[in-house]
Each structure stands twice: as C-alpha cells, then as structure tokens.
Amino acid sequence: MLHPKQRAYLKKKAHHLDPVLHIGKSGLSQSFLNELDQALEKHELIKLRLLDNSPFDFAEQMEDLLRESRSEFVSRVGKTLVLYRKSFSLKPEERLLLPPVKK
C-alpha cells in the first residue's frame, strides 16, 4: 500500500507520461491484462486511458483491475488512470526510488 507521500511523488512523475494502454470495448480481456503486466514490468509507472466505447466501470471493476495486475492505484483524472507496480526485472538504477516513509 502506498503512503500519501509516495502517491504524490508518483503522481508528479506520471504527469508527463503518455498513456501506454487503452481500455476499449473488450474491457479487461486476458490479452489486455497480459499487455498491462508487460507494461508494468517494463515501466513500473504507467498511464491507462479509457476509450469512449469501453464498458469499464470504475466503481465495479477497479478492484479487479488492481488485483489482476498486482498494481497500486496512484491517481485518476477523467478517463486516465495511473498505476504503479515495483518491477524486479529492471536494473536497480532503472527502478523508481520511492520516498522513504517515517513510521
């Protein structure tokens, strides 16, 4: 679970990103989830865009999306979602370094 400071840091990092995947009329199909998994593994922080013809319902399917992708919700602005998942396949210098959280 992301701390609010970490979430704010990731939102700032994601500001300049373009959406790498679009949720279209197929919704959360297995092929979409496979592409999402690959994108998260390669980038850690990604934007998704909901197309107008998408059957995706935030209230009903957001938990499914996060569970299936093993990712963390960062933010939502309109029809754009930002997700984060730490990648262990990236070299340490390529990974996002989240701010430490004081307990």
Image (cartoon, rainbow, N blue to C red):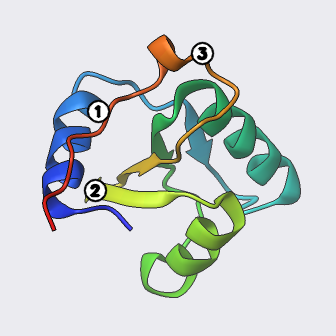
Please state which amino acid type lies under the numbered disc 2: Ser
Give the farthest residue toward the bottom: 60
Residue at 36 percent of width and 54 percent of height? 79
Describe residue 25's horizontal placement relative to residue 20 as left or right: right
Q: Is residue 16 above or below residue 11?
A: above
Query: Sequence order check: which comes first, mark 3 or mark 1?
Result: 1
Q: Is residue 4 above or below residue 14?
A: below
Q: Which image quarter holds the C terminus? A: bottom left
Q: Which residue is drawn at 34% across and 24% down?
A: 17
Is residue 27 or residue 89 the one in the foreground? 89
Which residue is the extreme one toward the right? 30
Q: How far apart are marks 2 and 3 (CA)?
A: 26 Å
**Tag 3 near tag 1, CB within 8 Å:** no
Which mark, by number, is residue 91?
3
Residue 53 in which image quadrant: bottom right
Residue 72: quarter of image: bottom left
- The one of 34 and 98 positioned closer to us in this rendering: 98
Mark number for residue 14? 1
The answer to whether the residue labelled 1 contacts the one labelled 2, judged by CB atoms less than 8 Å apart, is yes
Q: Quadrant of residue 19?
A: top left
Q: What residue type is labelled 3?
A: Lys
Secondary structure of the residue carrying numbered label 3: loop
Residue at x 32% of width, y 55% of height: 74
The residue tagged 2 is 75
